[in-house]
Image (cartoon, helix red, strand yellow):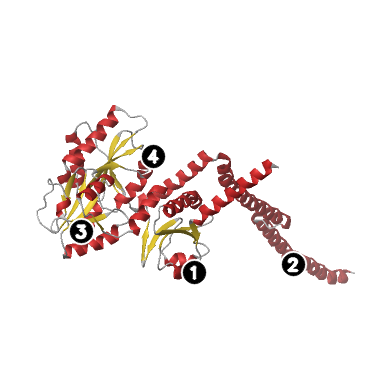
Amino acid sequence: MAEVKASLICGVLAAFLSSAALAFVEDLDDTFKDTRVNDIWLVDFYAPWCGYCKKLEPVWHDVGVELKSSGSPVRVGKMDATAYSGMASEFGVRGYPTIKLLKGDLAYNYKGPRTKDDIVEFANRVAGPAVRALPSKQMFEHMMKRHDVLFVYVGGESPLKEKYNDVASELIVYTYFFSAPEEVFPESVTLPELPAVVVFKDGAYFTYDEYEDASLSSWVNKERFQGYLQIDGFTLYELGETGKLVAIAVIDEKDPTEESGRLKALIQRVAKEYREHFNRDFQFGHMDGNDYINSLIMGEVTVPSVIILNTSNEQYFLPSEPIETMEQLVQFINGVLNGSAQANGGDGFIQRIKRVAFDARSTIMSVFRSSPLLACFLFGLPLGVISLMCYGICTAESDDGSDDIDALKREGLTDEEEEEEEEEEERQRATELEGPEEGENEEDDVGEKDPEEKKTD
């Protein structure tokens, strides 16, 4: 009896904890549009049949628990975009899952990794003010330790500050924006004039120049990454929005070699020592493994090696000879910059056809590798049905042809027999025409002889 009570208590507690966890994520319906105005919402638009949505579900519950327990003003919800398709289309949902933070009349898309920490960090960043104040040196030093890239506006009211606020509202989905008085900076930081926008990264600081750097939004978008970083699929996607070419050292971190370390060090040195020459046009980094690169270029890249990607038009550049020194690497990058290096790939018609064929082949191969029996069923069954249909059509045609020939033979309607029959009919007509004339002549002869015979008699 005691065991039964204990099991019942455990079940009740488990159900209570489960319901409490679920309460952190609210199921939304078509009334959400009218009730959301006064709150900040982080919403997952999903489809019940979507595999990626099901994979995100436990992460989403953890996000709800984290934000609720930390006292965040962000409410977490989820909406079945197939059941409420009209509502989803109003928020610009085009695929599943789609994560959006809704703040007043603004909707911010989340495009980062689908992990709890990254999503929570995104929600807290976007939910707060677009520009945060740094009133003291201690606060500035604390933020410098927390962030690899730090944008700070320095100065009073000005048109530049208005532009900075607008850019912050637009790009808050990517990075933090701060404002501070000049006194909070270390003595080593000297600004040529005020107001100014400064970015702190890579152990240095760089100032926005309105005449050289074009628009402030474009400058922030290009400077929001460190000069050198580890690159994965999500990072490469975001780098494509900066308009920069991406120089990558493709290495194997699981099996590091001397050559991999040398190429990685060369890329890092160029990123730091040649910043003034290449920062405007190039982003530098390394990638672990060549699987993702191979899928992009539809080919094979050796490990280790160096490749430069142009994500805007899907072109890529490979060095004509192995990179041994920094001078060779700089020469290769300059060749890409001035157009003398050979470009491969692209987004032309032929490349698009190759991409479709490559993606189809990759999908089929991945299905066969993951589940051979399922792949045989999925691809073997349609092929078998098509084969049977083709066989039936071919045999039906041959049978019909033989039946027609047999019928013609039975009816005597083949071409050769028809000709023979016509000739036979002509001969019969000729014979019939000749026969009566001979009979009449004989009768005339008989008629002429009768009177003589009579006279003789």
Please name the residue that numbered disc 1 is placed on.
31
3D distance between C-alphas at marks 3 and 1: 39 Å
User: In terms of sequence position, does the residue under pointer 3 or pointer 1 come before the other?
Assistant: 1
Query: Closer to us: mark 2 or mark 1?
Result: 1
Please name the residue that numbered disc 2 is placed on.
437
Circle 2: residue type: Glu
For the view shown, which residue lies furthest in the left direction?
192
Q: Position of residue 234 (x, y in %)?
A: 36, 48
Quadrant where the image shows the N terminus: top right
Contact between marks 2 and 1 (CB within 8 A): the answer is: no
Residue drawn at point x = 84 percent, y = 70 percent: 452
Circle 3: residue type: Leu
Query: Closer to us: mark 1 or mark 4?
Result: 1
Q: Position of residue 415 (x, y in %)?
A: 64, 56
Q: Residues within 10 Å of mark 1 (few under 14, many from 20)?
A: few
Quadrant where the image shows the C terminus: bottom right
Residue drawn at point x = 9 percent, y = 53 percent: 192
Circle 4: residue type: Asp
Please name the residue that numbered disc 4 is placed on.
291
User: In terms of sequence position, does the residue under pointer 4 or pointer 3 come before the other?
Assistant: 3
Please name the residue that numbered disc 3 is placed on.
216
* Label 4 secondary element: helix
For the view shown, which residue lies furthest in the top direction?
258
**Quarter of image, res 209:** bottom left
Say which mark, if any, is on residue 406. Answer: none
**Residue 125 position (above or below residue 379):** below
